[in-house]
Image (cartoon, coloured by chain):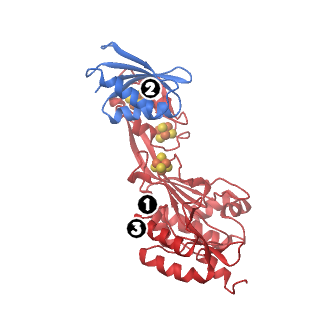
Chain colours: A blue, B red
Amino acid sequence: MENKVKKSIDLHGVACPMNFVKTKAALAGLAKEDLLEVILDEGEAILNVPRSVKEEGHQVIKVENLGSTFKVLIKKG
Amino acid sequence: MEPEIDLAAFKKIGMIQQKQKEYFAMRLRTVGGDLTAPQLKKISEIAEKYGKGEVHLSTRQGLEIHNVHHTNLEKARLELEPAGIYMGACGPRVRIVVACPGEATCRWGIIDTKILAAELDKKYFREDTPHKFKLSVTGCPHNCAKATENDIGVMGALLPRWIASFCNDCQLCVNICPTKAIERLEDKTAKTKKPGYILRKKKCINCSICTLSCPANSWVIAIKGYNLFIGGTMGKIPRLGTILKKLITSKEELHALIEKSLRYYQREGRKKERFGHMIDRIGWVKVKEELLHGKQG
Ligand code: SF4
Ligand code: SF4
Ligand code: SF4
């Protein structure tokens, strides 16, 4: 992987829309192309956060299924 | 004293006698649950003037003014009409058309539900049918307007297609597809040595989740149209709607199939028999054949 993960946040148990708010805040602290790793719950969280992240111009580059949570890697756009 | 009125005629326009026999509920005609702010003000004014100052929201996006004395019904009706508020329907006939907000405001929306609901309302509202008849238009397979619980349910639908060159292999689609209709295959696209993503069409419910969420816009819309469900009902004997046809791309064809379904029910349905129960009585194979290929309109 070209870039190293700059920040990691665990949003397990954090409901919509706070999970997206926290993801957005974490991305705001990074530079363009930096990678953020986020743990998201199954269900609403994994359905909504990546889509909202896309709407904000960032890119999901990896989603790993960890059972009832997902590890999502996001590249800041 | 019991009023001397034609209750059936009143019911037809949504004036429903309450158990307090001199009082009526005035059921109003809404389409997709939409009203303007001035209309709401007018309704509020009439509810205060002729009712008890209360309005009731029905389970199907309808609005009712309760506790109106029978001697005031006509006055109330005439005062509502200039604001574009008309009476609804009750009894064995086509009821108000429900709809979700659809693509006008909802990000998942695939079709314009409001336009279609208005067209259906204009064509069929208050037509007589063997039993009550309900139509619903929902913008996508999230099914917020419960297309599958109505006699006719239209659902916005799409078929996605995968474009290999855009894909970054993030695997989001595989993980969020609600029916696991997307499969990732290692090295399937042998030329590029990149994994391939395959759509299992039989499992796909035609939603907009993959096309909207894919970060690389690798899932694109191949076909956009309507899924048509018929025969859904809740009530005493619930039955979910059966899919008559998937991914109908022409609105004319959609309207023709709805027309045919309603006419079929008007011809063959028994009194107090909902459309879905008629379908079960006649048999789905026969009904489907008649509606998709039958001659009678
Ligand atoms: S059915 Fe789809 S388009 Fe309609 S409100 Fe629900 S999510 Fe939005
Ligand atoms: S979500 Fe899009 S980019 Fe990610 S694996 Fe699926 S098709 Fe590829
Ligand atoms: S349209 Fe919906 S059901 Fe079909 S593959 Fe995409 S996400 Fe899955």
Q: Amino acid at mark 3?
A: Pro
Dot 3 lies on which element? helix
Number of the front mark, 2 or 3: 3
Q: Position of residue A1 (x, y in %)?
A: 34, 13
Callout 2: few (<14), some (14-19), or many (20+) C-alpha neighbours within 10 Å? many
In the image: residue B37, left or right of residue B133: left
In the image: residue A6, left or right of residue B130: left
Dot 1 lies on which element? helix
Figure quadrant of the N terminus of chain B: bottom right
Q: Quadrant of residue B72?
A: bottom right
Mark with earlier residue (1, 2): 1
Callout 3: few (<14), some (14-19), or many (20+) C-alpha neighbours within 10 Å? few
Callout 1: few (<14), some (14-19), or many (20+) C-alpha neighbours within 10 Å? many
Number of the front mark, 3 or 1: 3
Residue holding disc 2: B171
Seen in the picture, residue B212 relative to B136 is either above or below; the reply is above
> Distance between the Cα atoms at labels 2 and 3?
49 Å
Residue holding disc 3: B38
Query: Can the viewer see residue B168?
Result: no
Dot 2 lies on which element? loop
Figure quadrant of the C terminus of chain B: bottom right
